[in-house]
Image (spheres, rainbow, N blue to C red):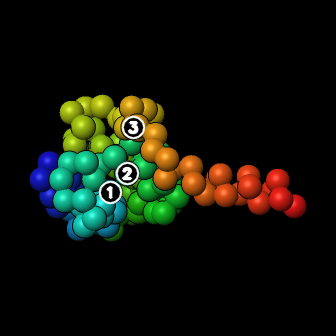
Amino acid sequence: MAHPYHHAISSSRQFGGTPDEYLPIHNWFDQTKAHLPDVRHRAVLHSSLGIFLCEQVFGPTLTLSTGKKVPVRLIGEQHVREDMGGEIPTVQDWLGDLPLRPWMARGAARLSEQEEGS
């Protein structure tokens, strides 16, 4: 889907309520577009980890204006599946083939050197 609002429309059709009630959750998933404006932004939150982080941020349920409670995890799963062709990738799926670079371990090497010098 191209925009968080379209995900919100989909949520309202699937779970009830209005699109505006779901928009904060869908905006949260797509906030990474501000830092990497192509589909690679999805590597940050469009995963099983992102879904559980979303639940930590928004709580276990979203209470609609009708009083109905919708599990936030289901809304997150819907968002990720819509963007990822029906799948929910893991962090391993996204990062498993990421090449290791020397800069990634520089801090750990410095900490080891400090321990040896103590």
Q: Amino acid at mark 2?
A: Leu
- In the picture, the quarter occupied by the C terminus is bottom right
- Place of residue 36 in the rendered image (x, y in percent of width and height, measured from the top left): 24, 59
Q: Amino acid at mark 1?
A: Phe
Q: Residue furthest front?
A: 117
The answer to whether residue 15 is above or below residue 48 is: below
Q: Which residue is mark 3?
A: 98
Seen from the viewer's position, the closer of residues 10 and 40 is: 40
Q: Which residue is mark 2?
A: 45
Q: Badges 2 and 1: C-beta atoms under 8 Å apart? A: yes
Residue that appears at 30% across and 61% down:
32
Alpha carbons under labels 3 and 1: distance apart? 22 Å
- Place of residue 54 in the rendered image (x, y in percent of width and height, measured from the top left): 44, 56
- Place of residue 60 in the rendered image (x, y in percent of width and height, measured from the top left): 51, 55
The answer to whether residue 23 is above or below residue 48 is: below
Q: Which residue is mark 1?
A: 29
User: Is 75 placed left or right of 61 in the picture?
Assistant: left
Which mark lies nearer to you, 3 or 2? Answer: 3
Local secondary structure at mark 3: loop
Seen from the viewer's position, the closer of residues 73 and 54 is: 54
